[in-house]
Image: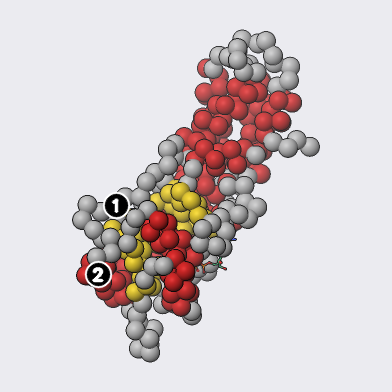
């Protein structure tokens, strides 16, 4: 019936003009609408609860400003809180003091890691870096070839295991890839790792072994925004099994309203660094908390 949360709140609060403070009942009515908007955006329920409790607390103490009507005032509070939870300012990539900076990608199969590796490499190049891609997904048939294809499109070389020697050892490939980067003076190494369709102990162990071998400056958890609430359990499993320093959300071009962003950020406490929103290499940007907040609010 209403197009946006802001419309909904305006309707709920239409009788409030002229009041000095929002009443408890006004705040409760407003928070019900916010709760629906967040659930519709596929934010996980415990995250919604915590968020609403916080907004309620803040709205209670707030004076109704002269410049804004009460609905606008509440939307402003909600928006500020959302931007805060989503990370405030855009967090920049951690670069090593002594190159090469090692970035490892981890996530489920199909999350978009290999595609992202190409996007990130292209972006790094545009920033003046000289990246090297390393193909450590030796599980999925064609993953190495796929990385070589995106590497070529991005104009970035790919370090891959020699063909024809069986499956190969991803830990060894990672180690040699970083050595190669040092040798050929690439200042950033992006390591693509294997994922499985579901969380799986062997996958976690392999990712943890690669991590221990190359000690990444950034481990980025790559997650498909379309999986909505499942993003929380997957993120928790990767946090506990491998650990990560940042998050990349993919497939934001789907109809996901971005609830996964809020959930993953809130549950793991790790920042979202990048957003991927399409299959092409250029469909990629650093993550903007303010834009995502507007998207979640509708
Ligand atoms: P991996 O198994 O994690 O390496 O995932 P892939 O990089 O192979 O991606 C799985 C599928 O998702 C491929 O068909 C990609 O083209 C597609 N994909 C990756 N990122 C995006 C994105 O941001 N938007 C859309 N629409 N598709 C994507």
**Which of the numbered marks, if any, corresponds to residue 95?**
1
Q: Quadrant of ligand 1?
A: bottom right
Q: Residue at x 60, y 42 (%)?
A: 295
Residue at 57% in and 26% down: 76
Per the image, the residue denoted by label 2 is: 184
User: Is residue 220 positioned above or below 140 on the image?
Assistant: above
* Image quadrant assignment for residue 242: bottom left
- Name the residue rendered at 61%, 10% in the picture: 20
Mark 2 neighbour class, 10 Å CA radius: few under 14, some 14 to 19, many 20 or more: few
71 vs 44, left or right, is right
Residue 55, picture quadrant:
top right
- Mark 2 or 1: in front is 2
Residue 198 percent coordinates (x, y): 51, 66
Q: Position of residue 233 (x, y in %)?
A: 50, 55
Q: Position of residue 28 (x, y in %)?
A: 64, 25
Q: Residue furthest right?
A: 1
Kindly report the distance in space between the C-alpha atoms of the residues bearing marks 2 and 1: 18 Å
Secondary structure under tag 2 reads loop
Crowding near the residue tagged with mark 1, few <14, some 14–19, many ≥20 C-alpha atoms within 10 Å: some
Question: What x and y, as percent, mark residue 111?
Answer: 52, 63
* Res 188 visible: yes
Image quarter where the C terminus lies is top right
Q: Is residue 237 visible?
A: no
Q: Name the residue nearer the viewer: 286 or 212.
A: 286
Residue 56 tag number: none
Q: What is the quadrant of the N terminus in the image? A: top right
Which element type, helix, strand or loop, lies under badge 1? Answer: loop
């Amino acid at each position: 019936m209403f197009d946006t949360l802001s419309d909904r709140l305006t309707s709920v609060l239409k009788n409030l003009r002229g009041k000095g403070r929002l009443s408890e009942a006004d705040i409760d009515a407003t928070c019900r609408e916010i709760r629906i908007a967040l659930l519709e955006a596929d934010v996980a329920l415990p995250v919604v609860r915590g968020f609403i409790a916080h907004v309620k607390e803040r709205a209670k103490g707030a004076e109704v400003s002269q410049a804004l009507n009460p609905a606008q005032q509440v939307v402003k509070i909600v928006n500020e809180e959302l931007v805060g939870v989503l990370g405030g300012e855009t967090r920049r990539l951690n670069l090593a003091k002594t190159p090469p900076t090692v970035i490892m990608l981890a996530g489920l199969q199909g999350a978009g890691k290999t595609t992202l590796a190409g996007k990130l490499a292209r972006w790094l190049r545009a920033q003046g870096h000289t990246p090297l891609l390393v193909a450590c997904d030796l599980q999925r048939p064609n993953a190495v070839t796929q990385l070589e294809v995106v590497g070529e499109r991005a104009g970035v070389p790919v370090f891959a295991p020699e063909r024809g020697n069986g499956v190969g050892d991803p830990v060894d490939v990672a180690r040699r890839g970083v050595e190669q980067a040092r040798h050929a003076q690439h200042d950033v190494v992006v390591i693509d790792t294997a994922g499985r369709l579901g969380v799986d102990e062997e996958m976690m162990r392999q990712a943890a072994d690669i991590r221990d071998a190359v000690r990444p400056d950034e481990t980025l958890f790559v997650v498909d925004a379309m999986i909505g609430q499942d993003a929380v359990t997957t993120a928790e499993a990767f946090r506990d099994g491998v650990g990560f320093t940042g998050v990349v959300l993919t497939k934001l071009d789907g109809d996901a309203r971005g609830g996964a962003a809020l959930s993953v950020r809130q549950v793991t406490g790790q920042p979202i660094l990048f957003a991927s929103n399409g299959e092409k290499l250029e469909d990629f940007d650093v993550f903007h908390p303010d834009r995502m907040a507007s998207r979640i609010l509708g």
